[in-house]
Amino acid sequence: MTAGDDWVLKAERLGCVYADNGSGNQPSSGVYADKFTLPRGQVTAIIGESGSGKSTLLSILAGLRKPNRLNDQSRLLYRGKDGRVWDQLRENRPPPGEIAFVFQEAQLIKAIPARANAKMAGHISNKGNAGELARDLAQDFELGPQWDKLSETLSGGQAQRIAIIRALCVEPNLIVCDEPTSSLDKTMSQNVIEALRWWTHETGCAVLWVTHELDLAAHYADRVALVSSGRVYCDAETGQPWTLDAPYEERLDILHDLIEQGRKQPP
């Protein structure tokens, strides 16, 4: 596989238009990607102001939301660990365990222990080492005292850490994260993103991460794409997110400059 082919996900000429319920149910906003290629083995941050379309883009790319802005040349391709390619626009979806999700809310089953939630996805995906991996991650995420407690007793931050363990236990090819640290303090946010970054660099898989925390993205993202006024901005030729290959302060300046450039784009 050549470097140019080393990708996990490709999207071209697709998007989603949705209705504004306050204006007679007429299409008024959405998100559109002319070309987007997610590289393997890196953490890619999606940044942009609130309401720009970041979460909608994420749900389309992950197959959670069906795009409705298409033409004959539109495509949404996903490449698995074994090199096999699925075309999600043709209802040819990858098997369970290839893609894992971490949402803004933990989405735990509250009536069962934290450990059962953490191991659930791994067991469903027939991962034989899910229990061992979950226990190790629980120690890394400082959840030992909560491990056997009912999930309904967990704080928001503890619940979110369990949700991240649940995603990692699937040993996925891609983790899709929508503001996964929004309920965590600064130290634990760093621990979580460090764990995700270690995982993707170690396994050669990918993390697609929507975040508004530019400081965190400057520290841990390998690449970045901007969503502004419903448009996805990245390298126009390759479709790949821009590389963040610079010292931290320069990375942070780049991210702030991108946000400013996005504000100047026409609606």
Image (spheres, grey):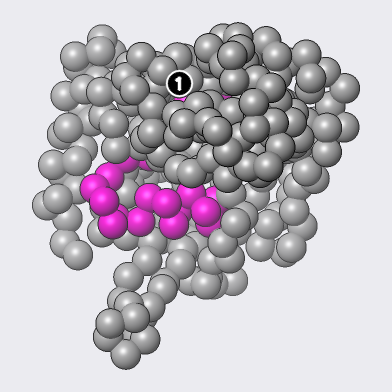
Does the segment drawn in magenta span residue 9? no
Locate the N terminus and report the quarter of the image it occupies.
Answer: top right
- Give the answer, above or below, for where 141 lies relative to 47: above
Q: Residue at x 71, y 37 (%)?
A: 112
Residue range (magenta):
41-61
Residue 263 appears in the rendering:
yes
Picture coordinates of residue 102, whole percent (x, y): 54, 38
Query: Which residue is at a point 28% across and 82% down the rendered structure image?
Result: 22
Residue at 69% across / 31% down in the picture?
113
Residue 84 is situated, as x and y percent measured from the top left of the image, at 79, 39
**Viewer-side residue, 191 vs 45:** 191
Note whether residue 7 is visible: no
Q: Splitting the image into 4 quarters, where does residue 148 fall?
A: top right
Question: Residue 122 location in percent, x, y?
Answer: 78, 31
| Of residues 229 and 161, the one drawn nearer to the viewer in this rendering | 161
227 w.r.t. 241: above or below: below
Q: Name the residue at 32% across, 90% down.
A: 24
Secondary structure, mark 1, is helix
Q: In this view of the protein, which residue sits in the foreground, 197 or 266?
A: 197
